[in-house]
Amino acid sequence: MTLLVAGIALVNTGDKTGPSAHGQRPAAASGTRSEPTTDSRAGARAAAARIAERLGGTEMMDNEARRRLFTEIAAPALRQKIIAEHDDAYDAEFFAQIGLSPQGKPPAGTEFISRTEASSGTVTHYQAQQRATVEVPCTGIIGLKGPDVHEPPEASQFTMTITLIWHRGEWRFTESKQT
């Protein structure tokens, strides 16, 4: 799961072994109260799309922001495991592969671009008040921009399969896969 999310960033470079780095979007994910989701197929689709966009965001490059994200969206029973897996995946080696410092920061004078737009997905599995799996088509853009950057950010299309559980009135993230 972690390498899949992590691999989104490397789709454009041809290396599919590192962490995700597609776009951040301020839309609420399941686990926030600003956009509640319902225990329905439509609610699961909406939650999965918001989560896919957040997993592809620049906040994944910042240790504290990434941990806050998973604290917000992950199923409580899996939260620490998910955080640890992603902390391991988002390491200095991965950051170097996408042009960032060992701390996940862009070089001076550049900006790291990472955005994902998710379409309404297809629910492939649904059990009311229990579990849902949603295939979410996404378009992402990733790269560095700045005066000395010679390669523009690149776009890619991919599908994230997001698995959710229904927990205390909302959909919570348990895992993802990317194709």
Image (cartoon, helix red, strand yellow):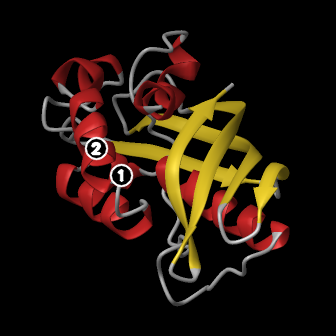
- The residue drawn where x is 17% and y is 24% is 92
- Most extreme residue toward the top is 14
Q: Residue at x 51, y 56 (%)?
A: 173
Image location of residue 163, percent across then percent down = 62, 48
User: Relative to 89, does residue 162 appear above or below in the rendering?
Assistant: below
Q: Is residue 145 visible?
A: yes
Tell me the quarter of the picture where residue 79 sits.
bottom left
Label 2 packing within 10 angstroms: few (<14), some (14-19), many (20+): few
Q: Is residue 138 above or below residue 143?
A: below
Asked if the residue at tag 2 contacts the one at tag 1, i.e. Cβ–Cβ closer than 8 Å, the answer is: yes
Q: Is residue 24 above or below residue 56?
A: below
Q: Position of residue 20 (x, y in %)?
A: 45, 35
> Which residue position holds label 1?
78
Q: In the rendering, at what x and y percent does residue 23 appear?
A: 52, 50
| Nearer to me, 10 or 47 | 47
The residue at the point 48 percent across, 45 percent down is 114
Q: Look at label 2 and name its amino acid.
A: Lys
Q: Height in image: 22 above or below 101?
A: below
